[in-house]
Amino acid sequence: MAEGTTLLLAALDALPDNRLAEDCALPGWSGKHLVAHVALNAEALMNLATWARTGVETPMYSSPTQRDTDIATQAGLPVPELRDRVVETAVALDASLAGLTEQQWHQAIRTRQGREVTGEEIPWMRAREVMVHAVDLNAAVGFDDLPGDFLESLIADIAGKRAGAGLELVATDRDVRWTVAGDTKTEVSGTVAGLAAYLAGRETSDIGRPAPELDAWL
Ligand code: ZN
């Protein structure tokens, strides 16, 4: 999570203000939408940290509509303010997680998708956001700049959630493979970075074709 935050903030620092007004890698979003979302995500995860700390149900977002409205509204903020918000909310999330006790880390909470997890899932949820969105900024960061152990965990995570797609993922740069459950079995080979990008529904030239089309994830 800390490594991903550093990577994202460095990528963001290197992007001039005017570039953030342009499209990012996610359909319908500018760079400003993406930065607003990353800041709001930190606040949403702080709600989960509150839930873990108090045991009182505190969802990430009050509703999917509210989540989207907040992103659209905050994307209209001046860029310097967005830059400050993304830093401040990352620091605040760190502080709220640092205060959790052993017992609170094991408190049952629920993600936005309704998955039952414990507080221990929060740093992983945030790591995924900051790492993958560092790439989505269309700055200098690609999937092959992300740490190898993170990429392998990401593939294992998404492979579980894409059950039904029927894929056999074979890495060409490491001796590792993953199976995505399904009736059929299409083999897709590529670098670990390419397979992670593909499975996340991102553009990549680092896998062999043809590979079945996948929707964007996260
Ligand atoms: Zn996200």
Image (cartoon, rainbow, N blue to C red):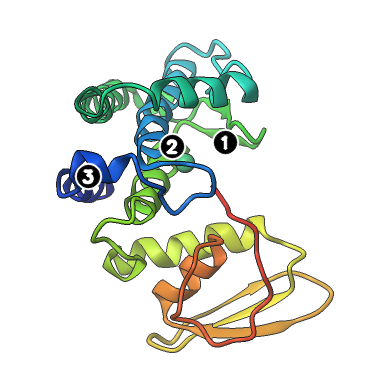
Q: Position of residue 91 (x, y in %)?
A: 22, 27
| Identity, as a three-letter code, of the amino acid under mark 3 | Leu
**Disc 2: residue Cβ within 8 A of ligand 1's nearest atom:** no
Mark nearest the camera among 1 and 3 is 3
Q: Which residue is more in the foreground, 81 or 113? A: 81
Q: Secondary structure at mark 1?
A: strand
| Identity, as a three-letter code, of the amino acid under mark 1 | Val
Decide if residue 140 is on the left or right side of residue 72. left
Circle 2 residue: 120
Q: Which of pointers 2 and 3 lies earlier in the amino acid sequence?
A: 3
Q: Which mark is residue 12?
A: 3
From mark 1 to mark 3, how far is it between C-alphas? Answer: 31 Å
Circle 1 residue: 117
Decide if residue 126 is on the left or right side of residue 195. left
The reply to whether residue 74 is visible in this rendering is yes
Using a 10 Å C-alpha cutoff, classify the residue at mark 3 as few (fewer than 14 neighbours), some (14 to 19) or many (20 or more).
many
Q: Secondary structure at mark 2?
A: loop
Q: Which residue is more in the foreground, 145 or 180? A: 145
181, above or below 109, in the image: below
Q: Which of pointers 1 and 3 lies earlier in the amino acid sequence?
A: 3
Using a 10 Å C-alpha cutoff, classify the residue at mark 1 as few (fewer than 14 neighbours), some (14 to 19) or many (20 or more).
some
Q: Which residue is more in the foreground, 119 or 201? A: 201
Q: Residue at x 34, y 52 (%)?
A: 131
